[in-house]
Image: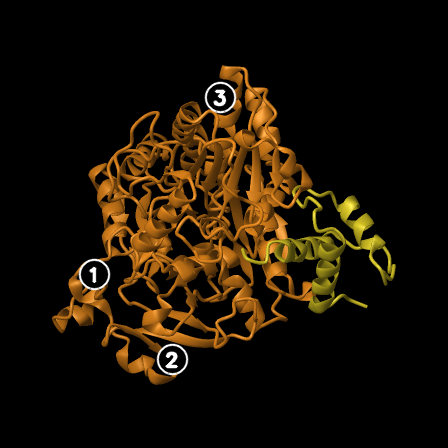
Chain colours: A orange, B yellow
Amino acid sequence: MAEKRTEFESLGGNNLDGIGGNAKKITYTAEDGSKKSIQIDCGMKFSDKALTGVDNYIAPLECDDLLITHAHADHIAGIIHHIQMNPERPLNIYADKFTHQFMLAEMTKQGLPLDNMPKFHDVKDGEKFMVNGFEVEPVPVTHSAPGAIAFVVESPDGTRLMDMGDFKTTPVELGKGWEDARMAEVFAKGIDVCFCDSTSTTSKEVTPPYEAVTKGFKKILYDNPDAQMMVGTIARSAQQMMADVIAVAEYAKETGTKPRTFILDGASLVQVNNALNKSDMSMEKACYERTGVRVKIIDAKSPEARTIPPQERIYMVTGTQGEELASMARVSRGENRNIRPSRTCPNLCVNQQAVIPSGDNQAIVDEMMEALRRQGWKTMIPERGAPFVEGETYYVSGHGRAGDMEKVADIAAHNQPAGRACTFIGIHGDEVQTKATEEIFKDKGQKVEHITNAQKVVVSKGEVQVSPTIGKASRIAVIDDNDNFMDPDFRYIKQAFNPVSKKWEDVKQIDYEKILVSKNDRKKDGKGGKGGKGHGGKKKGNKGHRDMSPMLMQKMQRTH
Amino acid sequence: MALLWKDYCDIADALNEAYPDKALTDMKDEELIRLVKTLPDFDDAGEPDETVLSAIWNRWVYVAYPED
């Protein structure tokens, strides 16, 4: 007879080489030895193709029942590739309606036959559902992507695990987001292990709310009342765009002027807006309900766009990192037929995303902004790492900092049932980031553990233990010989992390059984162990999935 | 007969050619069905479901904004 147990395994995301490719598997083993599993997320990790020859990496997909936390590429972009590799696979995807609509748009855009589409199940706050023997409770959280969800998964033996997804603890502008009271309610029912987003936990304080963006953007409107505006944004991070929409409404109300119209230039922006409308998260409607002001959002293809006076336009465009073919770069080269500088009023370009420190990004963005200035655009771009200034800052991250984690720890401490401790584990980060998360919870008196990819957290009889053995950490390299992302003719090569060479290698080159050694063995060999340098990861710091070349960033935007 | 990927691309291309200035933002399914039915060589095989309409619309967006 087997011992009943619930296991959590990081299939991807707790990488030694930076953020991306998030995937987690939860398995329940019954007394008769039978197992049931579900997976959370199946993302992509972005590669520097110039160095590796690999377009991107995708996480494994080990279950047919998949919970999706939100619609960012590092959580969802692996799925379509797995379907392309195995079109007949019966996949069930459980996600917020916006995430569902966005994924559907991307999958159809990339040519996935409708017969091979996964079956989507829309989930809602407070509506528990059963999947493969697990009871799942979705809990809204705040992230830059709308519809972000934390999942509480209760296994048949009553073990309760919570994957927080990507989150911060301030309110959202669109849809449902983080609420202290809701999270208190969740912890009050008891959580055995809580997995926390570690992306920004090396930074102090709480990540500022989107309300701060509204204030900063409104100041830009006050400073440039007569300018035609162009704003660079990341489409799927629509909470920030919503903050801009509210700023326009509030400015119009305060000044008694006609609200500006948002003109979306780019397929991804139009698709995100459509997905929001189909998910009962219309930005126009939400803005009106909150401010009483009707702000119009139209696409640049619309004839109406040309009838709007320049000083009443805000073009929302893609290409914040200077991606060659995206809207903003084409404007800078005078090649965008939808957007040109006005000759009758000032022109202002606000790039609402700091330069991502990777490759030649800085030089490329500098060149683009300079080209825009030569055309007569005044330009603004936030400085990476600049301190938050109330009323001035017009870009905020969607990931919680140390202060957000402290808030989670406090909520757990005040609400967790007596005698049922929660163990906190950092995920979604490299070793520096995940350990920083765990230190925060430890300092708050909470229990913590640490895992890397392919390492299991085992909960049995209420005891939480981390398996000493690192399993077969694997990922799949996606290689497109034609360098054409819309061409589905990819090659897929399974790779595994070789703990001896400290490199990802093609599976056929690796003899797993010879190289798989327990952490304890590695310690004995003087090659490091839990928490030691033996994990071999580069300490890249807090760069995240945005740390990629412009061309790859462009691909990311084109795919997810 | 099920529509193939090429069919969606053909429909999207035809829509873009026939309606180059048509606003895509927040287009209702009923409007999309009406526009598809106006295309030459349209073969009415009944009302398409939401997923089929989504496929056509999403491909059309990509055709309308080929650079993105």
Which residue position is annotated with label 3? Answer: A251
Task: State how far apart marks 2 and 3 are (Cα).
Answer: 58 Å
State the SS at label 2.
helix
Of residues A16 and A104, the one nearer the viewer is A104
CB contact under 8 Å: marks 3 and 1: no
Q: Residue A452 placed where, x, y %? A: 30, 60
Q: Residue at x 27, y 50 (%)?
A: A542
Of badges 1 and 2, nearer the viewer stands 2
Could you tell me residue A255's position as x and y percent?
50, 16
Q: Would residue A330 be found to the left or right of residue A209 on screen?
A: right
Label 3: chain letter: A
- In the image, taking residue A178 as reference, residue A90 lies left or right, namely right
Q: Amino acid at mark 1?
A: Lys
Classify B55 as above or below A297. Answer: below
Mark 1 or 2, nearer chain start: 2
Apparent side of residue A523 relative to residue A249 in the rendered image (left or right):
left
- What's the residue at 34%, 32% (across, down)? A393
Q: Residues within 10 Å of mark 2 (few under 14, many from 20)?
A: some
For label 3, count other residues whose C-alpha is less than 10 Å away and answer few (under 14), some (14-19) or many (20+): many
**Callout 2: residue from which chain?**
A
Residue extending farthest to the front is A343
Q: Quadrant of the N terminus of chain A?
A: bottom left
Residue that mark 1 sits on: A530
Q: Secondary structure at mark 3?
A: helix
Mark 3 and mark 1: Cα distance apart in space? 54 Å
Which is more foreground, mark 2 or mark 3?
A: 3
User: Which numbered disc flags the more N-terminal residue, 3 or 1?
Assistant: 3
